[in-house]
């Protein structure tokens, strides 16, 4: 009864409004691509779709360098100074300057690396499309609005920009050889949404020019979160790219199609996690008992919701593959069933790690676990992908995520900060 009462109070809380707004972003990030995936898998075939997935995964690697974990570190910093307009202006300037610097550096390194990657060497336009998509992904301004806990308009603009990119796929991608266009138009759409959000930001804070000092401060502030986000990419969004280094593009297509579907379902829960983060960051500093109670509510919502979604995906895997990917993708069914295990695993690890350990300042321990999981995933992929293709990659990911979830909880217990069974005072 107590848990129900807390959940009922939460529905009336501003957190709920932010969660609803963030659902729109999840539609753009996870559900909206499922509108284009059935078209691309049929128009481009398994090989062409595999090339698109490979490019998207590569863009995630480059984009994560330019984004640098600011969606967490800058959100936390904005939350701490949201009443100080001048300080917010300095934060925005530093983050934008850092992103510009990292984007240029990341693209330069990526261009050199592309010559060593057979898929890009044979498809240079695919690399150009992936580079544009990477910049678009890194340009997001949602971190600022998460920090001030006013997400609605920013969510609308980001979704609108990505919807424009998705619509352009139907207009500009018609046959094999146009895979690069599918990447490029998504990048342009993301940039349009980010530009509109930037206009809203500068209606709230003074415009300041990035200085070397502000850029250095932003890089210092985001370093630990960059390690986290980069390590996460090693065993999440970068897997299609890793797989493409060992097997033919059509096998990448099987894996990526199943991964898109599982992430779409997981994305239904992400707004809950994101909307709790800034509030828990605040409560941990001022009222840890209240923070623990709120975290237990979050764990209840995320745990039960993710378990239900995981069971749905496992049971309906053949139907989902047939409807979304189309005929000729039956090899993706067992992949989707394995990846359905990720939904409850990731949901619980997000609560324990992002919502609890980061607000408590346990960044170092958190990053050590995530980095170890990334290395584990890479090692398993090198062994399993050449032998078992898409199924090997799927089991590598699930094993790594299981390691993360167990490692986070063990670390919290060891530190005496378990919010479920109590902590040392």
Image (cartoon, helix red, strand yellow):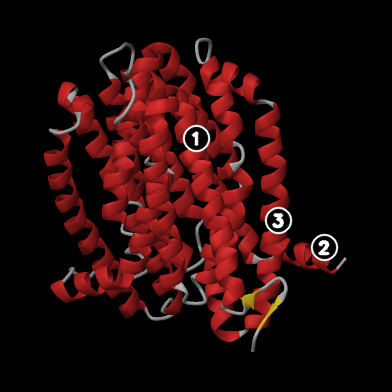
Label 2 packing within 10 angstroms: few (<14), some (14-19), many (20+): few
Give the class, few, some or many, for how many residues have Cα within 10 Å of label 1's Cα (few <14, many ≥20).
Answer: many
Image quadrant of residue 182? Answer: top left
Residue 206 at what x, y percent from top left?
28, 72
Instruction: Farthest residue to the right: give it.
Output: 1
Q: What residue is shown at x 58% (from left), y 85% (from top)?
A: 286
First of labels 3, 2 by sequence position? 2
Per the model, the C-alpha gap separating discs 2 and 1 is 36 Å
For disc 2, the marked residue is 4
Circle 3 residues within 10 Å: few <14, some 14–19, many ≥20: some
Which label's residue is closer to the chain start, 2 or 1? 2
Instruction: Give left or right: position of 342 versus 105.
Output: right
Instruction: Name the secondary structure under disc 1.
Output: helix
The image shows residue 54 at horizontal and vertical percentages of: 33, 30
Secondary structure under the numbered disc 2 in the rendered image: helix
Foreground residue among 307 and 413:
413
Report whether residue 399 is seen: yes
Q: Is residue 326 above or below residue 67?
A: above
Instruction: Locate residue 302, reporting x and y percent.
Output: 66, 54
Q: Nearer the viewer, residue 185 or 230?
A: 230
Q: Mark 1 — residue?
A: 394
Residue 191 visible in image: no
Q: Please state if 373 lies on the left or on the right of 290 as rendered.
A: left
The residue mark sitting in front, 1 or 3, is 1
- Label ID, residue 179: none
What separation in Å lies between label 3 and label 2 (alpha carbons)?
A: 11 Å
Assess whether mark 3 and mark 1 are in contact (beta carbons under 8 angstroms). Answer: no
Does the residue at mark 2 contact the one at mark 1 (Cβ under 8 Å)? no
Closer-to-camera residue (409/9): 409
Question: Which residue does the numbered mark 3 point to in the structure image?
Answer: 301
Give left or right: position of 11 versus 237: right
């Amino acid at each position: 009864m107590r848990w129900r009462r807390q959940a009922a109070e939460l529905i009336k809380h501003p957190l709920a409004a932010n969660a609803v707004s963030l659902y729109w972003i999840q539609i753009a990030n996870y559900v909206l691509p499922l509108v284009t995936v059935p078209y691309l898998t049929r128009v481009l075939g398994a090989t062409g779709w595999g090339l698109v997935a490979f490019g998207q995964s590569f863009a995630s690697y480059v984009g994560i360098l330019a984004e640098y974990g600011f969606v967490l570190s800058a959100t936390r910093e904005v939350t701490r100074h949201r009443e100080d307009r001048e300080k917010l202006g300095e934060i925005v300037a530093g983050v934008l300057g850092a992103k510009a610097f990292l984007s240029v550096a990341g693209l330069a390194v990526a261009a050199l690396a592309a010559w060593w990657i057979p898929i890009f060497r044979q498809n240079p336009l695919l690399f150009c499309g992936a580079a544009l998509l990477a910049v678009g992904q890194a340009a997001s301004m949602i971190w600022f609005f998460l920090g001030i806990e006013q997400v609605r308009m920013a969510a609308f603009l980001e979704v609108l920009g990505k919807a424009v990119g998705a619509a352009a796929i139907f207009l500009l991608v018609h046959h094999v050889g146009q895979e690069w266009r599918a990447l490029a138009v998504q990048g342009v759409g993301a940039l349009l949404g980010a530009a509109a959000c930037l206009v809203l930001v500068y209606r709230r804070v003074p415009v300041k020019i990035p200085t070397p000092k502000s850029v250095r401060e932003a890089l210092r502030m985001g370093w630990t979160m960059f390690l986290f986000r980069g390590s996460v990419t090693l065993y999440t969004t970068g897997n299609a790219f890793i797989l493409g280094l060992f097997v033919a593009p059509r096998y990448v297509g099987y894996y990526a199609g199943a991964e898109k579907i599982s992430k779409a379902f997981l994305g239904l829960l992400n707004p809950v996690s994101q909307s709790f983060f800034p509030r828990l960051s605040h409560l941990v500093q001022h009222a840890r008992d209240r923070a623990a109670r709120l975290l237990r509510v979050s764990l209840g919502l995320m745990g039960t919701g993710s378990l239900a979604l995981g069971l749905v995906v496992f049971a309906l895997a053949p139907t989902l593959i047939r409807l979304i990917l189309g005929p000729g993708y039956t090899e993706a069914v067992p992949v989707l069933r394995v990846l359905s295990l990720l939904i409850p695993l990731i949901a619980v690890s997000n609560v324990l790690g992002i919502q609890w350990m980061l607000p408590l300042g346990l960044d170092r321990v958190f990053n050590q676990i995530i980095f170890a999981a990334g290395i584990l995933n890479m090692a398993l992929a090198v062994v399993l992908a050449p032998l078992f293709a898409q199924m090997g990659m799927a089991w590598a990911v699930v094993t790594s995520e299981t390691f993360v979830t167990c490692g986070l909880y063990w670390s919290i217990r060891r530190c005496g900060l378990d919010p479920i069974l109590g902590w040392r005072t």
